[in-house]
Image (spheres, coloured by chain):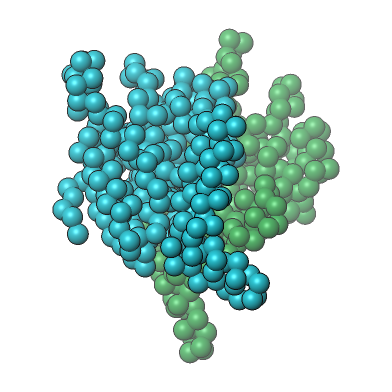
Amino acid sequence: MFETINYQIHNNIAWITLNRPDKLNAFIGQMNKEVQQAVKQADKDDNVRCLVITGEGRAFCSGQDLSEVNEETNLGDIIRAYYGPMIKEIARCDKPIVAALNGVAAGAGMSLALACDFRIASEKASMVEAFIHVGLIPDAGNLYYLPRLVGHAKALELAILGEKITAEEAKEFGLVTKVVPEGSLEKEVEQFAVRLAAMPTKAIQLIKRNLKESWSMELDDYLEKEAQGQRIAGLTADYKEGVEAFLQKRKPEFSGK
Amino acid sequence: MNDFTFIRTSVKEQVATIELNRPEVLNALNRGMVREVISALEMFDRDEDVKVILLSGTGRAFAAGADIDEMADDGPIDFEMNNPFADWDRIARVKKPIICAVHGFALGGGFELALACDMIFAADTASFGFPEVNIGVMPGAGGTQRLTKLLGKTHALHWLWTGDKMTARQAYEYGLAARLVAPELLMEETETFARRLVNQPPLSLRLIKEAVDAAVDQPLNEGMQLERKNFYLLFASEDQKEGMKAFIEKRRPDFKGK
């Protein structure tokens, strides 16, 4: 049903693979919509407990396909109609999302990676804030997430200078969780995703929710939010299992319920 | 309890709950459902064992609008003769607190029903809107009036003209939703609040509601007169004597609702 991406589920993990390798997985409107649709589908699917987004071929994603825009294009409308809804869908997703950076993540491709919860990079991968080189500003949520990940000063530096960020640098800036050898990216990501998929899924959702909202809340309001979150977590089967396993000195088996 | 077709009702520890119950159509309001909601509200208003009334919806939404099929072929004379909105006016005459718990959508008539309640508790994933404009009509059960009183003219026109959906966060910032709650805890938190009201002196709650409604609808001077009369009136209650005595004796008051 998808044409610009591949969507597969195994071991409770939904793999979303950007699949326009001859264009370095550049975004066209259809791909925005399909990523959005796939994330929504995975979020609703009870069999899915973790998502992975990666790219087919040499690149993760090279950003907007420039052959799709011309002088007549209203770039604001593209954000409103395509990138905005996709980024919002990712932000709404309750389950953990891992970006597996197999190659370059440029422009909106970098933005897509930033919107995910974790980034695992091949040593050959790189990121680049390409926008400034064509006289544009980082979009698709880029400047929203970037300072939250690396701080204001570094975000400004990266966005304005637009220099290539190697995988090692990305690790140093706090942009990626892990850098792995090129050949073992898939295996490493798989292991990482399997680990996430076996964790208490509801608690992960609540952690995501609270962390995100903490940015716009006063402490008093946040603490009420926290009380509600802990109340919800305390009602899960995974909490019960976690405590039982602890008392019985065994490994817990979380069902995600 | 009474036989209802479109709603479910229950009473627990002096809190009555009315649930819109047509989940297969996202609780779209038809005239029968509105009539049942009002019957239930009036029934609980008279019921001595009920102190607070909660209104909510089963399934994925509170209420995603009105049953369009029911009115598509109506003419103005049909409306005049059937007078369907007269039922709605009776909601405002219920004296006990009515708290509305909104999850999912509260659209069109569903939004109007929520606005007719005293307070809205919203799941933070809920959304509100008046899509009537998109089908060539407008709200008819108080939407333009109640939304404007809460939001002011400018914002009210924006939402009513566009038919766009307002997020729960926006509704909260406008003061339209009293509280935002995680969706999983919407009923629990709303009930906790209702239970607090159960322990408050019922006559005070009633006369406060009457005075606050007057503040919304009447000129200041008339509202002030009503407030004063209601204040005097409470001095005829046993709960006033008990409340003030308990305060002086530094103990918790035991209110009887008399």
Q: Residue at x 34, y 16 (%)?
A: B136
Above or below: residue B243 compared with residue A139: below
Q: Residue at x 41, y 69 (%)?
A: A255
Q: How many marks?
A: 0
Please state which of residues B15 and B67 is positioned toward the viewer in this rendering.
Answer: B15
Question: Which of the 4 image quadrants contains residue A223?
Answer: bottom right
Q: Is residue B171 left or right of residue A7?
A: right
Q: Residue at x 19, y 21 (%)?
A: B81
Quarter of the image that includes the C terminus of chain A: bottom left
Q: Residue at x 57, y 14 (%)?
A: A73
Question: Which of the 4 image quadrants contains residue A162?
Answer: top right
Specify the farthest residue to the bottom. A248
Q: Is residue A173 left or right of residue A190?
A: right
Q: Colour of chain A?
A: green
Q: Colour of chain B?
A: cyan
Say if residue A210 shows up in the picture.
yes
Above or below: residue A237 compared with residue A35: below
Say if residue A38 shows up in the picture.
no
Please state which of residues A172 and A220 is positioned toward the viewer in this rendering.
Answer: A220
* x, y percent for residue B234: 52, 55
Specify the farthest residue to the top. A72
* x, y percent for residue B196: 50, 63
Q: Is residue A115 left or right of residue A175?
A: left
* x, y percent for residue B217: 50, 31
Q: Is residue B176 left or right of residue A44?
A: right
Please state which of residues B158 and A118 is positioned toward the viewer in this rendering.
Answer: B158
Quarter of the image that includes the N terminus of chain A: top left
* x, y percent for residue B45: 33, 52
